[in-house]
Amino acid sequence: MSLCQRCNKAQATVHLLDIIPESDEKRERHLCEQCAAEEGLTTQKHESINEILSSLIKQSSGAPQKQDLTCSQCGMTFREFRANGLLGCPNDYLAFEKALMPLIERAHNGGDRHVGKVPQGVGGEPPRYSKLAQLRRDLREAVDAEDYERAATIRDDIQDLEADDG
Amino acid sequence: MTLTIDELVKRVGAWLGGEGPYADIVISSRIRLARNLDGFPFLSKSSDSDRSQVYRVLMESIAELELGEDTLVVDIEDADELDRQVLVERHLISRQHAEGEGTRGVAIANNEQCALMINEEDHLRIQGMRSGLQLACLFEEVNRIDNEIGQRVRYAFDRRWGYLTACPTNVGTGIRVSVMLHLPALKLTGQIEQMFRAAKEMHLAVRGLYGEGTDAVGDFFQVSNQTTLGQTEKDIVEEFASEIIPRIVKFELTAREMLEKDRSALLDDKIWRAWGTLENARTMSSDETLFLLSHLRMGVNMGRCKDIDLTRLNQLFLRSQPAHLQKLEGRRLDGEQRSVARARYLRSILDSHN
């Protein structure tokens, strides 16, 4: 554990590796969250990354937990879906995505992506669920690529969109 | 509103006209699109107020479409049980819709060639029907209605999964193409199982007269697609129109030719036995009626029976069904009374054509 190189008080949690273009020289910097934020190096909502990770771990965990997947919007569980074959709301496709994927592919003879018609939407705006879906997918990709800054930004966008709906 | 269910009973919908390409084997073509409104849960998680809102929003949008003067809107929740059954027998709503619960309805237009079900399994099901094999123009119509409604409401849609449906088996295009076929010769020559197997290999579903969960009675089969994801609507429709159905039709025609050539006595026996029974029986069940009318239809289409035409025959199919019979009789009948009424009705029509 090291202390922040800027304030020398708080614990350094932001670790940066700068490469100075002219000299190819590498410079390591260790800052605390506040100092990093003051230098405009990170977004404020650092803690959300932990949330992101834990929610992703929950979603991507193996078969035994599949049954316990729950949609935050309609409250349906994957177990409930398996019992009656009908989903509870459009968001279930995201909430249960990993568990649903093999079922969907089997039902559609290997088809795993929509290639048909796209609705115009009201006033030409894309439907909200598609935006939300895309963002959630982007988020997962960002986390997979360990691009946490981007992940945090996407997370904020998702929260904004969900707040709009509330 | 000009049209009522009582008036519906007195006529035969245009999609049962007995016209269109391959009409001797293809009874009807239908295409439905499954749609849901964005921002509302699917029906399994809908509150009463969600259901009513969806109903209102969709009915208002539908009212704005120019569907024609003969549009009939039925509030299924409020409708009489017999009226609901009439709509099922005319293939305008599903059994599930008739027997369901809560706020739900249907808008019927274009001489029964269009039916928009609200709050069935999905918020909206846009259905088009045509006599014979007429899929291209049918898709055009259904697609146009979908676009027009889509300009008024926001559908639940996702770029990867497409149109989001309550059941994942419909996700993507939400399209179901189904073609009702009359295949008596394949049945008589014992080749129908081969057709089933081929259909299964092509990922098609084969069902009975009333769709999902119904048995095939009287040699009538509904063939429909099961894949709605990973293929465009056009490709699905095109495959049915130019490959799947023509192939099955050819299979049936070959079987008919074989019967004519090698077993004409057996063929005529089936046809005229059917006629004789229908014309003389004093009680008659629904299933037996379908079975016999199937043979009669085969006789008419193969030119071996000229005493009745296809239009009249389709009328018999439609009106010998339980709810239609009761409507025509103007009273409720139990099973046995229906069998007597059915036999009487069949005799009356067949006698007048002798």
Image (cartoon, rainbow, N blue to C red):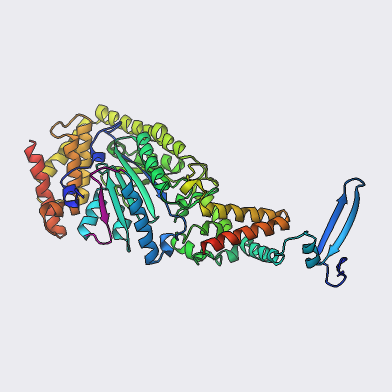
Residue at horizontal 88 percent and vertical 46 percent from the top = A21
Does residue A2 sit above or below A134 in this rendering? below
Helix, strand or loop: magenta stretch: loop
Does residue A121 sit above or below A54 in this rendering? above
Q: Position of residue B167 (x, y in %)?
A: 45, 55
Residue at horizontal 46 percent and vertical 41 percent from the top = B201
Counting the numbered discs, the total is 0
Does residue B228 sit above or below B249 in this rendering? below
Furthest-bottom residue in view?
A: A9
In the image, A131 versus B169, the foreground residue is A131
- Quarter holding residue B68: top left
Q: Position of residue B17 (x, y in %)?
A: 23, 37
- Quarter holding residue A40: bottom right
Q: Which residues are magenta?
A: B66-79
Horizontally, is B103 left or right of B311 in the view? right
Q: Quadrant of the N terminus of chain A?
A: bottom right
Q: Position of residue A158 (x, y in %)?
A: 60, 59
- Quarter holding residue A96: bottom right
Q: Decide if residue B97 is in sight here.
A: yes
In the image, B352 versus B7, the foreground residue is B7
- Is-magenta flag for residue B70? yes
Q: Position of residue B16 (x, y in %)?
A: 24, 40
Horizontally, is A97 left or right of B171 in the view? right
Residue at horizontal 46 percent and vertical 36 percent from the top = B235
In the image, B207 versus A115, the foreground residue is A115
- Is-magenta flag for residue B287? no
Q: Decide if residue B213 is in sight here.
A: no
Horizontally, is A159 left or right of B310 in the view? right
Furthest-top residue in view?
A: B261
